[in-house]
Amino acid sequence: MSDHPIEGLIGASLEKIKQMVDVETIIGDPITTADGITIIPVSKVSFGFASGGSDISSKSAKDLFGGGSGAGVTISPIAFSVIANGDVKLLQMSMNANSSNAVVNMIPDVIDKITSIVKKKDKKDEQ
């Protein structure tokens, strides 16, 4: 029993999507600047896939089949992970980030500020 023609269409489309979308598409290659800062791009990948076909009954010996498939991929850069002096920060590209993302992104800055206040207080107490 041979494979149905739609299987070939779907298989070829999925293989092309697999070639385009991999982990390296989402988390890009690290870029290291001259002063030792490492920048890693982070992207959002969305894709859609559709296929369809129709067998047409025929009295001839040939199988009649009509079909098609297609896919679309969108890759959008959304952030950069920046590593400098042992600190890691996530810099979002969107100014319209939702509030939960904004809160998560503010946590490292808040911790840095609290740490510096505590260090200043400890230094003051030592004197």
Image (spheres, rainbow, N blue to C red):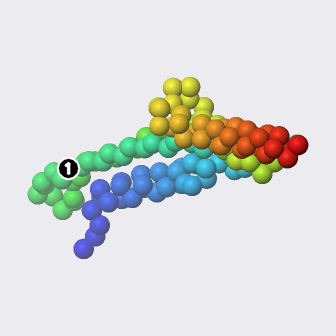
Secondary structure beneath label 1: strand
- On the image, the x and y values in percent for residue 107 come to 60, 41
Q: Is residue 43 left or right of residue 39?
A: left
What amino acid type should be assigned to the residue bearing mark 1?
A: Ser
The x, y position of residue 4, in whole percent, is: 27, 62
Of 22 and 9, the residue lying toward us = 22
Is 16 in front, or is 48?
Answer: 48
The N terminus - image quarter = bottom left
Up/down of 102 relative to 36, above or below: above
Q: Say how many tags the image has.
A: 1
Q: Position of residue 59 (x, y in %)?
A: 11, 57
Q: Is residue 14 left or right of residue 50?
A: right
- Pointer 1: what residue? 54
Residue 112 in view of the camera: no
Image quarter where the C terminus lies is top right
Q: Position of residue 51 (x, y in %)?
A: 30, 48
Q: Using the image, determine if residue 48 lies above or below residue 3.
A: above
Looking at this rendering, what residue extends furthest in the top direction?
95
Query: Which quadrant holds residue 72?
Result: top left
- Tell me what residue is drawn at x 79 percent, y 40 percent: 120
Nearest to the observer: residue 11 or residue 82: 82
- Relative to 76, residue 58 above or below: below
Q: Residue at x 47, y 32 (%)?
A: 99
Residue count near mark 1 (Cα–Cα under 10 Å), binned few <14, some 14–19, many ≥20: few
Q: Is residue 116 left or right of residue 109?
A: right
Residue at 54 percent of width and 41 percent of height: 104
Identify the residue at the far bottom of this view.
1
**Point 49% across, 55% down: residue:** 18
Up-down: is 39 above or below 6? Answer: above
Residue 115 visible in the shown view: yes
